[in-house]
Image (tube, grey):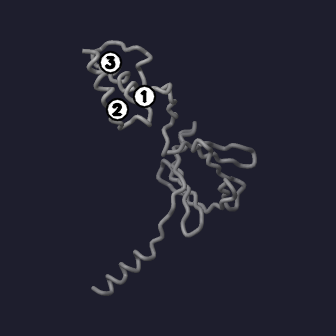
Amino acid sequence: MRIVLCLMILLVATVVQAQVIGSWKDDGPEGIGTDITIYKSSGAYHLKQVFRDGSRSDKKVKKVGSKYIQYGSQDYYVIDRDGTLKCYDKQGLVFEARSVNLPKVTEQNTSGGQSCYQLGVKYGRCATLSMKGKACNPSDDIVIPTRCRGNADTQRGIEAGARSVY
């Protein structure tokens, strides 16, 4: 029993936590569907790929500035400002992969400086009209911006907008 406990403690003590730099999905035109993760473990950077068929690849890469360069190859990877992972070889761009931590399409801020309450009223009015099978004013057909989600003023506005339809 003591030996098993000591072995378990030793195993737990030797587990090295990896720091994930980012995760991406390559939905390329060929439909490859590769999941890509760059992570750092024990001071070394790695690029792990999991392919649709379940096969895997885990390569060491070195970080030079903003590039992650694949050892033994001229291929390198760059994380764009918008979170996109781009792979280059000596001829140029090979593929782009979208971040799995970000939506495919970045939502535009169309709030025009309106308060969360005002936006909630528009949203509530449009949603209620739509549920009743009626058309809403296109200017009321909005997406609640991130800054207003979960906000008490937004909720009050949604309720007021829904009441305005009845």
Quadrant of image for the C terminus: top left
CB-based contact (under 8 Å), mark 2 and mark 1: yes
Front residue of 152/90: it is 152
Above or below residue 153? Residue 128 is above
Give the CA separation, mark 3 to mark 1: 23 Å
Q: Residues within 10 Å of mark 2 (few under 14, many from 20)?
A: some
Q: Residue 86: horizontal and vertical position, in percent?
A: 63, 45
Which amino acid type is shown beneath numbered disc 3? Ser
Residue shown at the point (32%, 83%) measured from the top left? 4
- From the viewer's perspective, is 62 left or right of 147? right
Front residue of 129/13: it is 129
In the picture, the disc for residue 153 is: 2
Above or below residue 107? Residue 19 is below
Which amino acid type is shown beneath numbered disc 1? Ser
Residue shown at the point (40%, 74%) measured from the top left? 12
Disc 1: which residue: 115
Residue shown at the point (66%, 61%) measured from the top left? 62
Please tell me whether mark 3 sits on a helix, a strand or a loop: helix
Q: Which picture quadrant has residue 141?
A: top left
Please tell me whether mark 2 sits on a helix, a strand or a loop: helix
Q: Which picture quadrant has residue 40?
A: bottom right
In the picture, the disc for residue 100 is: none
Q: Residue 140: horizontal and vertical position, in percent?
A: 41, 19
Disc 3: which residue: 130
Q: Residue 52: horizontal and vertical position, in percent?
A: 48, 47
Residue shown at the point (50%, 55%) measured from the top left? 55
Q: Residue 91: horizontal and vertical position, in percent?
A: 75, 45
Which amino acid type is shown beneath numbered disc 2? Asp
Please tell me whether mark 1 sits on a helix, a strand or a loop: loop
- From the viewer's perspective, is 141 left or right of 32? left
Instruction: Point out the tag, 2 or 1, that comes first from the N-terminus.
Output: 1
Front residue of 149/49: it is 149
